[in-house]
Image: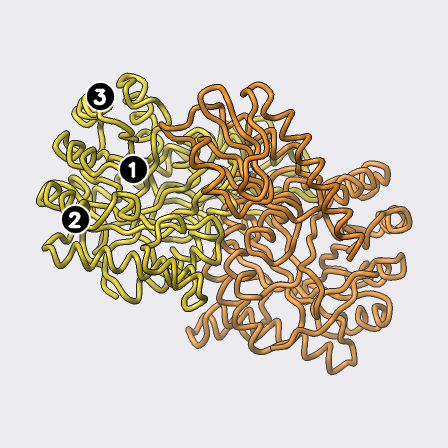
Chain colours: A orange, B yellow
């Protein structure tokens, strides 16, 4: 189904827009300084917009200050109290995330939509804990599955908002296991045109959560499903953004700076490839250009195997080569490899910039 | 297509067998001690069998010693010289990996199969660098795509082996980008019954390579494609195995110890969830039992949200609870949380063991 375009401040979800990356602050919202620092750090590593918890009326004043000074659109995270959603919208939220299942009735959702109209988008969140009451009984009687109940609940909420004349709706359907996440999002995309926010809830630590999110979100993104993603990790939020960027790169859903290809280390590797690849990754992590960089373990096969790379380095027996477009441009000692690579990369980026300027 | 069963030493690929995990040593094969140490380390973290480079005739003696003392089946990694494959089989390899495209003709492949018959499996590797000559011309004329040429080349090699009466064939079709990897493996599963070895070549560093592998292998594994996987990382090989295990857990293709679900940290979190989750992950990484463990940031919602977990811990405002099966079993001070969790986990595992014994 063609996805409806929804604005999040100056940004757009759906249509031709790239998949947007979100994260959430874990500072106390009342601590405006710390929260703004974290929002700035998130934006610096590539986050498009940031969600901030608004757990009580006391936090509204701080939220307003945060919205005013933040370099990106801010989403208010609301639970239970619809009045907080209304106040957050009045304080300048570009989107409010509510879970209609815990707001206490559709009339409360209507109040939120009334306040949001023309000002803010609404994310409708549905998880296994916020299924509509009518469906809960049907799940227990075995009439429908939990996944069906989730998609039907979400569709009911969206229909209610559309019928109220409010269309700036984003939907998230979340589970902590991958099969349910895939099933509910695939089904929902068939029956509703709202942009989808993807995430695996309670995915886990930086290590296991990264893998679970890469698999789960990766599958959906490769199917063209998902207009914004949040990788949830029990880790610093900037890590979430870095993982999200890599997932978007891997799925080809968004160009986000260099792609590094590098050999696994093997019994044939003759240089310290691990250190070199890590250095190259660090050097290039903030370059916005969409180029492919190869880091290969043997001089003989490296440049050929990595022919599709824009630039690369291959080493062996104390020496190495720098190659550009599959052709060797310089032979160097192993200890100079990284330094010379830096020089050639700089040149490549300059040339690219000049070419782009001439276009 | 129903996958043919192929033995790798005492292990099996295809049929009802679980997806097996492989890695490759990066020591010098001649250094028997270092290589065996690495093989043991790989097996300890969950590797099922290990590939070892056999780059020259000089390494055959060492390879033979390695095979004799290794705690798992050993695969010989052969390039260019079919005679090395024959010698590695005679030295006890459970599988030889050859790239027919660089062996120098099908008659060489026949010699390898003759030596392997009844003793060793053969992995036929095809990547974009080892496409049959006939197909290279067709790619250049635009008659077929590179992906088609890869699958057709692989099918030709397998047909040749089957026609020679050799059936213990495993196939790997590798590319460094995900779309090609998906396409060639999906197509190949339609046209051939050989077990498939999955991997993304030159996937990258521990960080980006993990994500690329999780997305690429994850998609195929969720479709039921893939009987053995290797995650290629420019990182220590034990890391490859840990990532492989998490991918298999995430896709549900193999039960491999605990699954940890944990909240992202957010403005509502009242304890140091990051440290706690990391501690729990470390504590449980070598437990073989397939249990779900939750680490949650708030006492109020934690146990309910993580109802499907076998055991969990939730903290807030200096205190926390331990819950088992969604029910709170103990309230504790924050500083005692991890210690008390350890005790309850131990109990749960004991009970599970007793129940399993009674079955």
Above or below: residue A322 compared with residue B36: below
Which circle's residue, 1 or 3, is located before the other in the chain?
3
As drawn, the residue found furthest toward the bottom would be A163
Q: Nearer the viewer, mark 1 or mark 3?
A: 1
Helix, strand or loop under label 2: helix
Q: Mark 1 belongs to which subunit?
A: B
Tag in front: 1 or 2: 2
Gap in angstroms between the C-alphas marked 1 and 2: 16 Å
The chain under label 2 reads B
Total number of numbered labels?
Answer: 3
Q: CA distance from mark 3 to mark 2?
A: 28 Å
The image quarter containing residue B41 is top left
Q: Say left or right for B157 vs B257.
A: left
Residue B79 disc label: 1
Alpha-carbon span between mark 1 and mark 3: 17 Å
Q: Which residue is mark 3?
A: B62
Could you say where residue B82 lies in the image, as x and y percent from the top left? 21, 39
Q: Are marks 1 and 3 on the same chain?
A: yes
Disc 1 secondary structure class: loop
Residue A151 shown left or right of residue A98 in the figure: left
* Circle 3 or circle 2, nearest the eye: 2
User: Badge 3: how crowded within 10 Å, few (<14), some, or many (20+)?
Assistant: some
Question: Residue placed at 53% from the left, 35% from the top?
Answer: A295
Report the quarter where the N terminus of chain B lies.
bottom left
In this picture, is B329 found above or below B64? below
Instruction: Tell which of A242 and B162 is nearer to you.
Output: B162
Q: Is residue B296 above or below residue A109?
A: above
Give x and y (percent) for residue B273: 61, 36
Identify whether A231 is placed above or below B333: below
The residue shown at (57%, 44%) is A325
Residue tagged 2: B107
């Amino acid at each position: 189904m063609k996805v409806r375009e929804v604005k999040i401040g100056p940004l757009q979800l759906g249509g031709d827009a790239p998949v947007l990356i979100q994260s959430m602050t874990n500072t106390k919202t009342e601590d405006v300084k710390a929260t703004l620092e974290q929002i700035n750090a998130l934006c610096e590593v590539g986050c498009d917009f940031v969600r901030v918890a608004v757990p009580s009326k006391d936090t509204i004043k701080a939220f307003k200050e945060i919205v005013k000074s933040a370099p990106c659109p801010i989403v208010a995270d609301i639970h239970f109290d619809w009045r907080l959603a209304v106040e957050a919208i009045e304080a300048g939220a570009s989107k409010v995330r509510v879970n209609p299942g815990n707001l206490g009735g559709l009339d409360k959702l209507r109040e939120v939509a009334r306040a949001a109209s023309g000002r803010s988008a609404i994310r409708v969140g549905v998880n296994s804990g916020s299924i509509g009451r009518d469906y809960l009984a049907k799940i227990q009687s075995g009439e429908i599955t939990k996944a069906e109940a989730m998609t039907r609940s979400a569709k009911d909420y969206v229909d209610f908002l559309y019928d109220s004349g409010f269309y700036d709706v984003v939907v998230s359907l979340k589970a902590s296991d991958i099969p349910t996440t895939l099933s509910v999002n695939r089904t929902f995309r068939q029956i509703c045109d709202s942009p989808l926010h993807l995430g695996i809830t309670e995915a886990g630590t930086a290590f296991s959560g990264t893998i679970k999110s890469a698999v789960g979100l990766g599958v959906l993104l490769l199917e063209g499903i998902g207009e914004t993603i949040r990788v949830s990790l029990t880790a610093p939020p900037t890590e979430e953004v870095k993982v999200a960027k890599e997932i978007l790169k891997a799925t080809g859903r968004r160009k986000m700076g260099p792609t590094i290809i590098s050999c696994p280390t093997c019994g044939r590797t003759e240089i310290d490839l691990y250190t070199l690849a890590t250095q190259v990754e660090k050097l290039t992590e903030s370059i916005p250009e969409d180029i492919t960089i190869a880091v290969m373990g043997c001089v003989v096969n490296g440049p050929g195997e990595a022919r599709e790379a824009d630039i690369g380095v291959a080493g062996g027996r104390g020496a190495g080569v720098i190659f550009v477009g599959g052709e060797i441009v310089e032979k160097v000692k192993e200890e100079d490899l990284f330094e010379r690579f830096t020089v050639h990369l700089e040149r490549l980026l300059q040339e690219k910039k000049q070419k782009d300027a001439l276009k």
